[in-house]
Image (tube, grey):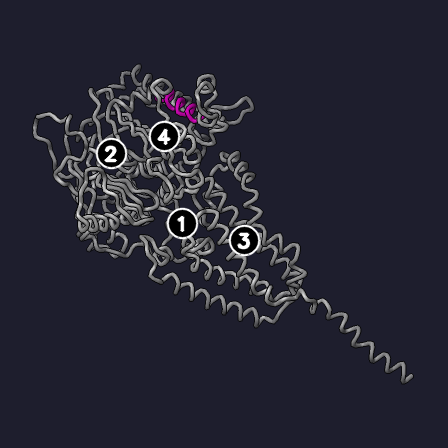
Amino acid sequence: MPSASYQGKRTAPSVHHSRRTPYKRSGDSIAARLLFFPVLFVYLELVLHIYMGAPLAYMPVYIVFGLAGGCVLTALTLPFCERVNRVLSKVLTFLISLIYIVEVIAKIILQSYYPFSSLGTAAENKLTDYSDVIISTVVSHIPLILVFLLPFILLLIFGRRYMGFRPYERSLAGMTLAAALVLHVLGLGVIHLPWKGDLTPKMLYHMNTNIDDQVDQLGMLNMLRLDVKHQIVPAKGITDDDFSNIGDLSGNSGEDNSGNGSNQTAGPAVDTSPNIMDIDLEALAESTSNKDIKWLANFFNSVTPTNKNEYTGMFEGYNVIMLCLEGFSGYAIDPQLTPTLYKLSHEGFVFNNFYTPLHFTSTSNGECQTLLGLYPNNGFPITMKRTGELGTNAYFSLAQQLKRQGYNVMGYHGNGDMYGRLASHTNLGYDWHQGGSGLDLEMTGGGKPCWPQRDSYVVEQSVDDYIHSTTPFHVYYMTISGHMPYSANWAVKPYLDTIRALPYSEVTQNYIGTAMEVDKALETLIDKLQQAGQLDKTLIVATADHIPYFDIATLEELTGKTFGSSKAMEHLDEKQIDFDVYKNTLFMWSPSIEEPIVIDKVCGQVDILPTVSNLLGLEYDSRMLAGRDILSDSEGMVIFTSRCWKSDKGFYNRYTQTFTPAPGVTMTPEEQEEYVSSMKKLVGYKLDSTAKIVENDFYNVAFGSESKMP
């Protein structure tokens, strides 16, 4: 018995040891557990930055913040039971990797990263319109996707062996969170280092715009985290209120910058008084407690207005038809293939240096520039959509201005409610018609709407709404037939016999087919106006929302020029492109213009609204728009999304921080430094003021709620 008892006592430790074995296996590494998520974030950020060609100089910023974020996730996967820790680690790793993958695909297809605050817009928009592009892009990027998923794959294969996932005391999780806090504070110190450039990590950290720059300099994790933060605590935005030294491009030099001196003839004295309204901006600034309203009033009060000129009121009382052409480039115009486009671009006003710079959310904010005369907010919320959500008073929109003159105002779009246009364009003042809301779409044999719709069909369905009006009318068309992908565009079917004979690739042939469809729509419109006796008193204005940014190779094929690598253009990486890729055509035509009027001034979409307002003889305040009257004696300028800019005096490259004077322009080094410094400041004001105007309903404050036409 003693012997048996003794043996029993010796077997107990053996049984106990067997139960503890899973917690002592060699793979149960505390180091692997603590380092996995910090290393994961560093890995994903480096893969993203290297693939996207982003600058690695900012690596210290996103590495430190990535380590901090990783420590937070580590703390979440330490204190639970083994199974929960294991499952939670795998789920978090997959979701985080998936976020990076989705962001890269979005950047490639839509030329923008998408923060969490944009998910509502993504859900509302018809992403099926991009289904072919999405599928082909995902398939072609499978190797990259696998690289992003590599940590998740390794975790699935080796995680249990080398990490174990056993529970640790919660005190270790607390210590890991403390490490995250220390690393976060260190990251704040890193962004405050004396970084060089027009946009620095410190500046971007306090902004809710310039998402691409935030990702480049702060990292994807920080961009997404700051987006969530700014939904709760608004970003600081602009704080500089020194407007004394801005070299306003609208400042009148006394020289004729229109490029039209040869067409001027002696005649009655021309009214060159400033295009301003009777509003005391200084008093408005002093009377308000709203810091944004105060800032805007002071800024606008510092702007030199543009003057009236020989073209003021040239089309007073005319009908106005404006078209925003989806994905259009003037490089597609051909005298035989697109005779109407060719006619309109070579008669009337001829703008030799017009640009359609690509800005955030492409189409919607291309419309923003044309319809509001403002540069769009470079981030969420989307400017045009936001005006509809808030009911913002778009006092200077052409729809509002002409409604106040008694015009009939209508608008059409051959698609559903993309970007909330039903709300935003109705708010602008248009009697808005789109698919599902007052516009019959062309249907397939299966009873589904054709995609994309033919613009000529939309014109035919809508023209009788206004063509016989006894009062002047203003009509706006957001076209659709030029929508990508051009590899499979239904609207070009009527032109296949013609375009297949062209010496281009099939995609380029199809793109030309979309231009031919736009040409057909304009031909139909002009014929209908002529038949109704309305053409002679109608001004037609048209330009693109943006270039066909997904098919830069097409533009290179059409022009024989190289605009930059396709990858750079897909990513909207403006530091590696030729900005002439944005050069485009502005159509501003009426049969009442007897001879072409040639304009050499640098100009862009934001300049359309003030130019047309002046041509119609409307009362508007030129200080309160980002655009300037192209036909005035002000200096021309166009601003690109990267904050590079081009003026009549030269081109400024934000990335190299160099200014290249235009041919024939001479400046001393001191003059150039002063000019560039003041213009950079003005560029920032113009780009960043739009959100303040919209969010604070500035025009409503300035002119009163009764000023908005229903």
Disc 3, disc 1: CB below 8 Å?
Answer: no
Residue at the image position 66 percent from the left and 57 percent from the top: 158
Q: Which residues are magenta?
A: 510-522
Question: From the viewer's perspective, is the residue at label 2 or at label 3 nearer?
Answer: 3
Choose the circle earlier in sequence order: 3 or 4: 3
Residue at the image position 20 percent from the left and 48 percent from the top: 672
Residue at the spot of label 1: 211
Q: Which mark is residue 96?
A: 3
Disc 1, disc 4: CB below 8 Å?
Answer: no
Q: Give me the C-alpha separation between circle 1 and circle 2.
A: 38 Å
Q: Is residue 116 magenta?
A: no
Category of crowding for the residue at label 3, using alpha-carbon neighbours closer than 10 angstroms: few (below 14), some (14–19), many (at least 20): some
Q: Which mark is residue 329?
A: 4
Q: Is residue 511 magenta?
A: yes
Q: Give me the C-alpha separation between circle 2 and circle 3.
A: 52 Å
Q: Secondary structure at mark 1?
A: helix
Choose the circle earlier in sequence order: 1 or 4: 1
Q: Would you identify the image quadrant in which residue 553 lies?
A: top left
Residue at the spot of label 2: 404
Question: From the viewer's perspective, is the residue at label 3 or at label 4 nearer?
Answer: 4
Q: Quadrant of the N terminus?
A: bottom right
Percent x, y for residue 523?
Answer: 35, 19
Residue at the image position 50 percent from the left and 57 percent from the top: 42
Visible in this render: residue 707?
no
Percent x, y for residue 53?
Answer: 44, 47
Residue that extends furthest to the bottom in the rendered view of this protein:
2
Choose the circle earlier in sequence order: 4 or 2: 4
Disc 3, disc 4: CB below 8 Å?
Answer: no
Q: Name which residue type carries label 2.
A: Arg
